[in-house]
Image (cartoon, rainbow, N blue to C red):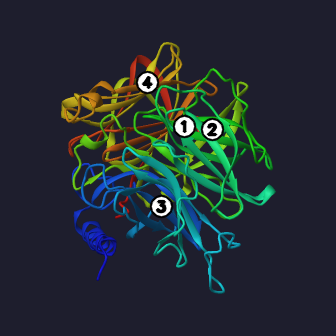
């Protein structure tokens, strides 16, 4: 008898290929961000590099375009930009959904799952969710480079008997030759750290929290080491997680047992200050010398199930390279898009001279799949920046700007397009974060991809991600300043090719 999970996997692959070849042109469909061919997606899971492939697993509903029946979808890429859909990896079974988790490459077969010479197990560590009853940590393994998966026959490997205990992120801690797991108690708003020698038996080492943002439940923790920018050989540790519906991070030290925070305890630091970035985690097993790379879910639980997209819902962020830097006595996480995004450039335009702007100034370039770089000198009292998805006689656009008087970077999507699908979306239209100019100048790199805007400010010191749902005709690009003359020194617009 053919089992249902196999049939689901086969059906999904067939539909994925058909959708990828024919239907990746629906309204609002991102062209260079990852989206599932069909159905609902949320958290990125199991990010791992193995044998030349970047694996992206993700929370996926094989049955429809709303949250439910959580299983692990799967895709692979050689460059983090162009993706190939693969069969459903780990399916829901009976009353147990497959919630978020991570994946490792067990090179030394500490788990004992490899039985033949040359086999290298990939091991997925995930939360098994029984609705309203229990969440515990389970493992599954693959002996064919992630193409098929077998659930461990002695699961669970970690069970506290709690309804809320989830999202294990596991990594190899080389100095002590052990596996480390970061996992959260969502209601208690606490991250716990466990260790193991074989991925099967886990011992509690320490806890962290509550701390920082405690307004929402805590989810999707990650603990990882990052380089200090411009200081070769120096590193710090980052603890990042998602207090719903946003994210925060702490930067400090980890000694193999305990994480200690080096930043001021009373301040909240976010990897993204927009409304639509959640559950980001970092790749395991990256090649030596490659910076840490994270991917996050582009959506917001306040309206996620109602966004007006079909036959899919949700996208992943661009992969981001991470480092840290001490600025004004605070450790700041720096994020920049991976360089592979530059291989998508289809056409390129750069203004050869400075451009003075005092008021609105419409550029000749147009597009809804662009990579825009701007650098301008801000002046006292000015509000200046760019309006994308400009159209409707100038009444429709998303505004990305800098308020010099208040020293704030902001994004305002209140006029960007469709908002009526959920009241929360319209109410959550403007987001801002403190940011100082550098030598009196503001530098932005903005990616606009149909229904996503990602803003990287001042070489990644602040990032903002937002969804918008504009008409196809809203493709204008307008610089603006509020009647204070500002000088744009760099204006570079790249049109990016689709990856589907």
Give the mark nearer the N terminus: 2 vs 3: 3
Let me know if residue 145 appears in the view.
yes
Q: Residue at x 54, y 57 (%)?
A: 102
In the image, residue 61 above or below residue 53: above
- Contact between labelled residues 2 and 1, with CB atoms less than 8 Å apart: yes
> Does the CB distance between marks 1 and 4 fall below 8 Å?
no
- Residues at badges 2 and 3 in contact (C-beta under 8 Å)? no
Give whichever of discs 3 and 1 has the lower sequence position: 3
Marks 3 and 1 sit apart, C-alpha to C-alpha, by 20 Å
Q: Which mark is residue 384?
A: 4
Q: Residue at x 48, y 13 (%)?
A: 381
Q: CA distance from mark 1 to mark 4?
A: 24 Å
Kindly indicate whether the residue at mark 1 contacts the one at mark 3 (C-beta within 8 angstroms).
no
Residue assigned mark 2: 333
Of label 3 and label 4, which has the lower sequence position?
3
Q: Position of residue 38 (x, y in %)?
A: 27, 60
**Residue 54 location in percent, x, y?**
53, 65
Secondary structure of residue under mark 3:
strand
Please report whichever mark, 1 or 4, sits nearer to the chain's N-terminal start. 1
**Residue underneath mark 1:** 271
Q: Quadrant of residue 63?
A: bottom left
In depth, the one of 133 and 335 nearer the eye is 133
Q: Nearer the viewer, residue 257 or 47?
A: 257
The percent coordinates of residue 310 (x first, y second) are 22, 52
The earlier-in-sequence mark between 1 and 2 is 1
Q: Is residue 194 above or below residue 302?
A: below
Q: Give the distance between the C-alpha atoms of the residues marked 2 and 3, in whole angstroms.
A: 23 Å
Q: Nearer the viewer, mark 2 or mark 4?
A: 2
Marks 4 and 2: in contact by CB < 8 Å? no
Q: Nearer the viewer, residue 337 or 150?
A: 150
The image's mark for residue 56 is 3
Measured in 3D between alpha carbons, the distance from the residue under mark 3 to the one under mark 4, in whole angstroms, is: 38 Å
């Amino acid at each position: 008898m053919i089992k249902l999970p196999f049939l689901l996997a086969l059906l999904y692959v067939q539909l994925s290929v058909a959708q990828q070849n024919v239907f990746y042109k629906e309204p609002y469909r991102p062209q260079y961000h990852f989206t599932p061919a069909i159905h609902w997606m949320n958290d990125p899971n199991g990010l791992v590099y193995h044998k030349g492939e970047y694996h992206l697993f993700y929370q996926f509903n094989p049955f429809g375009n709303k949250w439910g029946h959580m299983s692990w979808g799967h895709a692979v890429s050689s460059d983090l930009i162009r993706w190939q859909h693969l069969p459903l990896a780990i399916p829901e079974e009976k009353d147990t959904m497959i919630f978020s988790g991570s994946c490792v490459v067990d090179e030394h077969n500490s788990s004992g799952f490899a039985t033949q010479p040359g086999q290298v197990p990939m091991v997925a560590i995930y939360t098994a969710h029984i609705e309203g009853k229990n969440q515990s940590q389970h493992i599954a393994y693959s002996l064919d480079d992630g193409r098929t998966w077998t659930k461990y026959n002695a699961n669970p490997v970690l069970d506290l008997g709690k309804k809320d205990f989830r999202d294990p992120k596991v990594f190899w801690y080389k100095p002590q030759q052990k596996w480390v797991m970061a996992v959260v108690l969502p209601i208690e708003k606490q991250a716990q750290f466990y260790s193991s020698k074989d991925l099967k038996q886990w011992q509690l080492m320490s806890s962290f929290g509550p701390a920082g943002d405690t307004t929402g439940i805590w989810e999707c923790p990650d603990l990882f080491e990052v380089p200090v920018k411009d200081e070769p050989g120096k590193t710090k540790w980052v603890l990042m997680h998602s207090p719903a519906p946003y994210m925060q991070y702490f930067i400090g030290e980890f000694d193999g047992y305990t994480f200690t925070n080096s930043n001021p305890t009373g301040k909240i630091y976010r990897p993204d200050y927009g409304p639509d970035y959640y559950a980001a985690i970092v790749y395991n097993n990256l090649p030596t010398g490659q910076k840490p790379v994270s991917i996050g879910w582009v959506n917001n639980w306040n309206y996620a199930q109602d966004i007006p997209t079909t036959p899919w819902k949700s996208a992943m962020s661009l992969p981001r390279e991470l480092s840290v830097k001490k600025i004004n006595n605070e450790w700041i996480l720096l994020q920049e898009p991976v360089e592979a995004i530059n291989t998508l450039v289809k056409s390129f335009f750069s203004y050869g001279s400075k451009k003075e702007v005092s008021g609105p100034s419409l550029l000749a370039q147009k597009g809804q799949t662009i990579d825009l770089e701007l650098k301008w000198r801000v002046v006292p009292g000015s509000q200046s920046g760019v309006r994308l998805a400009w159209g409707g006689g100038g009444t429709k656009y998303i505004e990305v700007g800098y308020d010099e008087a208040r020293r704030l970077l902001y994004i305002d999507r209140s006029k960007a397009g469709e908002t009526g699908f959920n009241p929360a979306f319209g109410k959550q239209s403007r987001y801002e974060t403190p940011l100082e100019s550098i030598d009196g100048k503001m530098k932005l790199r903005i990616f606009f991809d149909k229904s996503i805007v990602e803003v990287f400010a001042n070489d990644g010191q602040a990032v903002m991600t937002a969804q918008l749902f504009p008409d196809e005709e809203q493709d204008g690009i307008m610089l603006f300043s509020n009647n204070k003359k500002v000088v744009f020194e760099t204006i570079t617009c790249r049109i990016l090719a689709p990856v589907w």
